[in-house]
Image (tube, grey):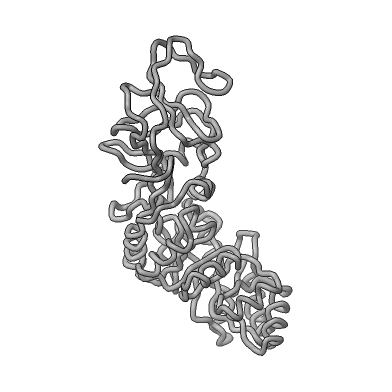
Amino acid sequence: MNSLHPTWIEIDLAAITNNCAHIIRETGTALLAVVKGDAYGHGAVEVSKAAVAGGVDWLGVARFGEARELRQSGIETPVLVLGMASPNEVDEAIAKNVTLTLHSVESMRLYSERARSANRTVRVHLKIDTGMGRLGILAGDCSLFTRQAVAAGGIVIDGMYSHLAMAEEQDKLNDIQYERFQLAVNAMEAAGLRPRWVHLANSGAAFSLPKTRLDMVRVGNVILGLRIRIGQALPEYYRPALTWKAQLASCRDLPPGWGVGYGQSYKTKGGEIIGVVPVGFGDGLRQIPGNQVLIDGQKAAVAGRLCLDQCMVQLQKHYPMGEEVVIIGKQGNSAIWVHDLAALYQISQVDFTTLIHKRVPRIYV
């Protein structure tokens, strides 16, 4: 692809649509596509539209500002805000039909007050803390709290959910959290208060703990074709959505013993061909030894320290300015994927993709 940019990211929207459809078929339940953090750096609006095309029932965001962006872009799919909301945001959520998380007595009072003031209702999902220690009420308080929320007025409880702290691991805490959540669900059913949407499974649990699927699963990684576990491949019908490319800026012969980069941590061992790629730690790569890129279908090692905006690579032959370089993706028979860099950096995949800088243009294909 010819690009107007020195470096850019291509997002395959068809892959996202495909991945969502496969998740729904594989789990046999409704899907909430988690698109917080600008869809983990992929672009929330475009990813959400592709996910809706794949059949998702809900979209999930962390903050109301993210929900506002979706609504302003014409997306009418139900949106759940998984975090807190300020008083003014509650008013806007009511107006824009955005569902909020009900997680405390304070949030109950706030939501009820703002809804009654507007002579409207606010839709919420009740958050149960089963062991994450984050937002939520305890399972034993669930039915009493729900009665209080209904009595306060203006609140419609459309769902209830919790979050697993160790879903990517085979840990007994998963069973403990599931049992705690089931106690809350059973109490709600006994009181005739069970809402329409009961959901517990995040990405890891959606595939490895079928009993947690309930009415809906919440998935982020896999809709983007990212692995649940770095060392475990997804089935081949899940396709990575993100490819990161650049154009070669320079290709030069350097003499033996020539220093490369800040601190001169690398010096040529003989006459070497050094290329310059316009991508650095200011774009989202990390200053950790072992970075590589692809050029002409071959892996090329980064020489020396990354710069903010550029990196230098060891080449086997000369290439013209503008030659395609792949930072993430496949070229020829070689590939570098997000999980490869996440393993090198010892971080999560979404930790990496979310922090790819906005100055790297996203191109949707």
Q: Is residue 276 above or below residue 265?
A: below
Location of residue 46 in the rendering, given as x and y in whole percent from the top left corner: 43, 62
Q: How many marks?
A: 0
User: Which of these two is toward me, 31 or 41?
Assistant: 41
- Tell me: residue 184, above or below residue 354: below
Residue 326's spot in the image, x, y percent? 37, 38
Q: Quadrant of residue 17?
A: bottom left
Q: Position of residue 25 (x, y in %)?
A: 32, 67
Q: Is residue 344 above or below residue 9?
A: above
* Residue appearing at x 51%, y 66% in the figure: 60
Front one among 88 and 2: 2
Quadrant assignment for the C terminus: bottom left
Whole-percent x and y of residue 48?
44, 65
Is 26 on the left or on the right of 155, as rendered? Answer: left
Q: Residue at x 66, y 90 (%)?
A: 119
Q: Image quadrant of residue 2?
A: top left
Q: Viewed as shown, does residue 319 lie left or right of 260?
A: left
- Where residue 213 sits, quadrant-wise, is bottom left
- 54 lies left or right of 94: left
Q: Nearer the viewer, residue 73 or 30?
A: 73
Name which residue lies at 53% across and 26% down: 305
The residue under the point 59% across, 84% down is: 156
Q: Is residue 128 left or right of residue 345?
A: right
